[in-house]
Image (cartoon, rainbow, N blue to C red):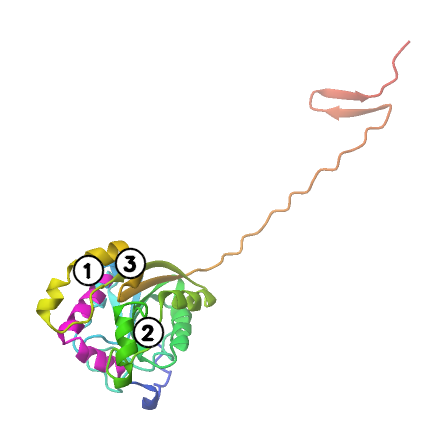
Amino acid sequence: MIESATPPAPAAEKTPGLAALRQWYETPAGAYSRACDLEIANAVLPDLFGYHFVQVGQTVDHGSELADFSRISHRVIIDVESAQPRCASLSCAADALPILGNSVDVLVLPHTLEFCPNPQGILREAERVLVGEGHLLILGFNPWSLYGLCRQALAWRGAVPWSGRFFSAHRLREWLGVLGLVVERVVRMSFRPPLHHVIWHRRLEVMERLGGHFWPVCGNAYGIVACKRVMVARPVRLHLRRQRRVPVAGVVEPTRNGLKPHNLPQGS
């Protein structure tokens, strides 16, 4: 599945965005967002089967939490930041995967599009390596949510996650449609503001139930499941119309039940 002959991407193309995101996950607000990502993965990955699982981008410093929810035994974790990955299988640029085309059954992008350059190139690589009927899981932050409002107010500081590029599920659906990937499912979670005070965070727990019922499209986090559809060409049988023969007067036409006279002269 892995092309060992493909040279690794230069270090200049890599970004520390996901590393800063992992540090933000250690804060109270980040821990809540991390729990939502794990809940989305738990709701989606156990139902996706195949032989090869690939995760592009690390969300934790040690281990592979998202991959643990998959039933696939062969798992590959790709580090898109450092040249010497700690717990990943290999390191490369997210838009230049050293993987054979049509070889991956399940591919996961945990906030990779938001904190890595060239998000459209990453999606093209995902489409290339996926097998026919393979699945892609994208984890992201919703710009039309409370997180999106915080990004509008705090992006100038350059702090993660507000410095990332948030893409709406509608825009990703359009990009995936151009590549021939069909969105099968969108899971939305997290309706509370990113508060660092645990007490206020618990008091606003009612927003989770209300948001999931009244304004589900405004969830802070989402998971998009897309499938690489393969169009199968089916031969079309040509049904030729039988030409009706014009009966000629005085000619006997054979049938299953015997002779069928056509305008035979009547005897006198």
Give whichever of discs 3 and 1 has the lower sequence position: 1
Q: Position of residue 209 (x, y in %)?
A: 20, 56
Amino acid carrying label 1: it is Met
* Most foreground residue, 1 or 223: 223
State how far apart marks 2 and 1 are (Cα): 22 Å
User: Residue at coordinates 71% horizontally, 37% vertically from top-left?
Assistant: 242
Label drawn at residue 207: 1
Q: Is residue 18 magenta?
A: yes
Between marks 2 and 1 in the image, the one whose residue lies nearer the viewer: 1
Q: Secondary structure at mark 3?
A: helix
Mark 2 neighbour class, 10 Å CA radius: few under 14, some 14 to 19, many 20 or more: many
Label drawn at residue 216: 3
Q: Which residue is mark 2?
A: 166
User: Residue at coordinates 24% horizontally, 80% vertically from top-left?
Assistant: 160
Between marks 3 and 1 in the image, the one whose residue lies nearer the viewer: 1
Mark 1 neighbour class, 10 Å CA radius: few under 14, some 14 to 19, many 20 or more: some
Q: Position of residue 96 (x, y in %)?
A: 38, 80
In the rendered image, the residue lying farthest to the right is 268
Quarter of the rendering containing residue 130: bottom left
Q: Is residue 203 magenta?
A: no
> Quick one: quadrant of the C terminus?
top right
Amino acid carrying label 2: it is Phe
Region of the chain picked out in magenta, as a range: 17-40
